[in-house]
Image: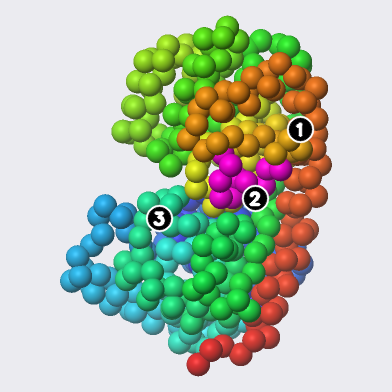
Amino acid sequence: MRIVWFSHTGDLGGAELSLLEGVKGLTSRGEKVLVIAPSNGDLIQKLKSLSIPISLGHFRFWTSQRANKPPFYRRTRRLAGHLIAAKYFKRFLRDFEADLVVTNTLTIPVGALAAKWAGIPHIWYIHEFGEEDHDVALDYGNRISLFLINKLSERVIFNSRSVADTFRNAIALDKCRTVDYAVEVPIMSLTRQDHISPFRIILVGRITKAKRQEDAVRAIAFLARKGLDVHLTLMGTEDPAYGTYIRHLAREVKVENMTEFVRFTVDPFPLMAAADVALMCSKAEAFGRVTVEAMKLGKAVIGANSCGTSDIIQNGWNGLLYQPGDPEDLAKKLEILYKNRDLLRKLGKNAQEWASQKFNLSSYTSSLMGVFSEAVGTKPDN
């Protein structure tokens, strides 16, 4: 099978990592994959290291930040740009003799349009809610855009049950598929020993309002007032305004000496492995790659009881759930694990075994191939 996979960026985020893992799995089974992206970045460099063919081409999003939705005339101009780009890539797809086209995000329409005009089956792979997690809106409204996503796709893949539930009413049920990621992590030998102080807590993710690092800061303040020896690491690229707010909050609640800010790196795993417990505080996590990464490293995870996080964490078995936006409840869950290291180890062990069985490259590749084969065997909508 010859597959063209459109990425909305050349950098590495959750959606791009799933693309990278998918390409690795597919090519290991002899499939031919070409990735198209609008710019260079870490994703492109990783693909080059795997000798995956890449093409850089100009195309734009059909989403905008909700606060900056473009006026009608600008959206009309953007539409013209989408059509021009799709016309170019139509020829490209035919020259490559593609059997299938995959769009790796809700945010770009060019692959779907080009595939339609070239008469090639198309799959839309949706990794995000849009408004809830990234505060973006579709330029042409949900009704029209989701109609097109359904019309232009033989199959639509979702990365979690929560995301699937969000879009299911707009997509034909026979087209909907949910596929679990691979979520690869390195084998780490670094482990924490019981009762070594301080009790280390880590939250990995972009430091932004949607990720709610404020819950973590307020929670350790509750613990500090009880005399518990805790340390919080916040790892991620900072949104300037929210990062400033979180630093000010840490000073205000007197935990600045217990809170460490670390810039994001493509290899966060040593710090994660050195922690006692990992957090996921976002109320609108589409999937929760960081949650699974921590689990695969044998860490107990405490997450907000919402969206993709509650799809992954089975409360009391492979992690703990807290009431979203309630730092006092989060503090109570942290205190439980602080005082009960047997439970901490049990949750981490269960999490590691479960995540390793559920999220692995072999299963991910097989699931993708199953959906891809369905799409290629399905006559495109007219």
Whole-percent x, y for residue 60 in the image? 35, 65
Quarter of the figure with residue 372: bottom right
- Residue drawn at 46 percent across, 14 percent down: 255
Q: Is residue 207 magenta?
A: no
Whole-percent x, y for residue 266 in the image? 56, 39
- Residue drawn at 59 percent across, 14 percent down: 230
Residue span colored magenta: 304-314
Residue type, numbered disc 3: Glu
Q: CA distance from mark 2 to mark 1?
A: 16 Å
**Badge 3 is on which residue?**
131
Residue type, numbered disc 2: Asp
223 to the left or right of 37 = right
356 to the left or right of 182 = right
**Badge 1 is on which residue?**
347
- Residue drawn at 72 percent across, 66 percent down: 367
Quarter of the figure with residue 193: top right
- Is residue 298 at least partly visible in the picture? no
